[in-house]
Amino acid sequence: MVTIKDVAKQCNVSIATVSNVINGKQNVSEATRRQVMDAIERLNYTPNAVAKNLKSKRTKTLGIIVEDITVFCAPGILDGITKCCEEKGYNIVFTNLRLYEKFGDAYYNNEDFYKLAECQLQQIIAKQVDGIIYVTAHERELSCIPDNLPVPVVMSYGYIESDRYPSVFVDDETGAYELVKYVISQGHSRIGVIAGKHDSIHTHNRMAGYKKAMQEAGIEYDDRLVVEGAWTRESGFEKTDELLDQAVTAIFCMNDIMAGGVYSRLEEEGLVPGDDISVVGYDDRELSRYMNPPLTTMSIPLKEIGYQTALRLIAQIESVEILGENGVVSQAESAVNIADVENGIDIAKLKEELDKLEIPVAGELKVRRSVKKMN
């Protein structure tokens, strides 16, 4: 079997130099790098990942716990996590709690859910993962993760009642603000809202964005223009009449599914979305592009949320080597996009990044044909 010593001998360089090339370190000349890589290919050398991990006391494996993979947000987030892990050379151990099938959409109020989550955490830690990503089915505060876990944890698409674990989540307030601001720019001032469930963080934050945009435009808030839906198509259908009775010219639905219900009710009344009344949604579900007319909506950057979650977790894992006991390790490798310092890591910047507990990710406004420009 070809060893790292054979590669070093072939190139007439030290073993440390070959190791630096393999690990992508910057303190190697381009000519030496090419020489080593050519030798690795010629000798068909494969680095011993097991030995490397034993030395660093890391397995380069992340544990991923997903509350329910059937929820619309999960695939995009997992895609982003996978992309980041591929780029950074990390493996994944995955478990799906399947909470919707087991407990329904109010699973977070079920004591059995907490027991299941804690059990899965212990099982995945036993697989010697370096850290854990917990992917929620929708944004809310969690209390199912103990503060004393032996590995770092990062929340994806949710928050946790702890000052130890950071969270990466969608910036709903900014998203709703930009969406409603656009509707106002088209001449609308009587903008109705079909909100989500009252106990949802999504509802609270999107409502804050709506109010901010209205206040900024000098439009007085009117609670008669706000009705509560249930995230379902049926609730969008049923609540439409209440807003039509208030003579709204536009309806902001807090998700695209409810907007679909509004479309159906308007059609029954002989009204055309984007012509007789404007409608906007939120989430940028695939169906929004095929509605008639296509729905103006705000996207949720699910892939980016997943990517940033994995990036943050890897940064925490590798920061132990980066910061070290004395706070400085020259030429250390970082997962975060800190600063390209030629002779070392920007320690202050790294610490600043790792101290952040809340990491919001903004969506993108998708302007289509469901908003009418008022005269």
Image (cartoon, helix red, strand yellow):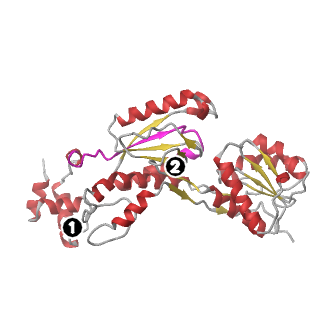
Residue at 37 percent across and 69 percent down: it is 339
Mark 2, secondary structure of its residue: helix
Based on the picture, tell me whether residue 67 belongs to the magenta stretch: yes
Sequence-wise, which precedes: disc 2 or disc 1? 1
Rendered image quadrant of residue 6: bottom left
Q: Nearer the viewer, residue 303 or 355?
A: 355
Q: Residues within 10 Å of mark 2 (few under 14, many from 20)?
A: many
- Within-10-Å neighbours for mark 1: few <14, some 14–19, many 20+: many
Q: Quadrant of residue 132?
A: top left
> Which kind of residue does numbered mark 2 sit on?
Ile
Q: What residue does disc 1 label?
A: 33
Name the residue located 47 percent from the left edge and 51 percent from the top edge. Answer: 166
Residue 77, numbered label: 2
Which of these two is toward me, 153 or 69?
Answer: 153
User: With respect to residue 46, does 296 lie above or below?
Assistant: below
Q: Amino acid at mark 1?
A: Arg
Instruction: Determine the secondary structure under disc 1.
Output: helix
User: Could you say where residue 283 lies in the image, as x and y percent from the top left?
Assistant: 65, 52
Task: Report whether residue 282 is seen.
Answer: no
Answer with left or right where residue 363 lies relative to residue 46. Answer: right
Give the distance between the C-alpha atoms of the residues marked 2 and 1, in whole angstroms.
35 Å
| Residue 361 sits above or below residue 121 on the image | below
Q: Tell me if residue 209 is in the magenta stretch.
A: no
Residue 172 drawn at (x, y percent): 63, 55
Q: Which residue shows up at 18% across the image and 69% down it?
A: 32
Q: How many marks?
A: 2
133 relative to 201 in the view: left or right: left
Where is residue 374? Give x, y as percent: 85, 68
Q: Relative to 232, does residue 253 appear above or below in the rendering?
A: below
- Over which residues does the magenta segment extend? 54-77
Q: Is residue 339 visible?
A: yes
Q: In which quadrant will I find the C terminus?
A: bottom right
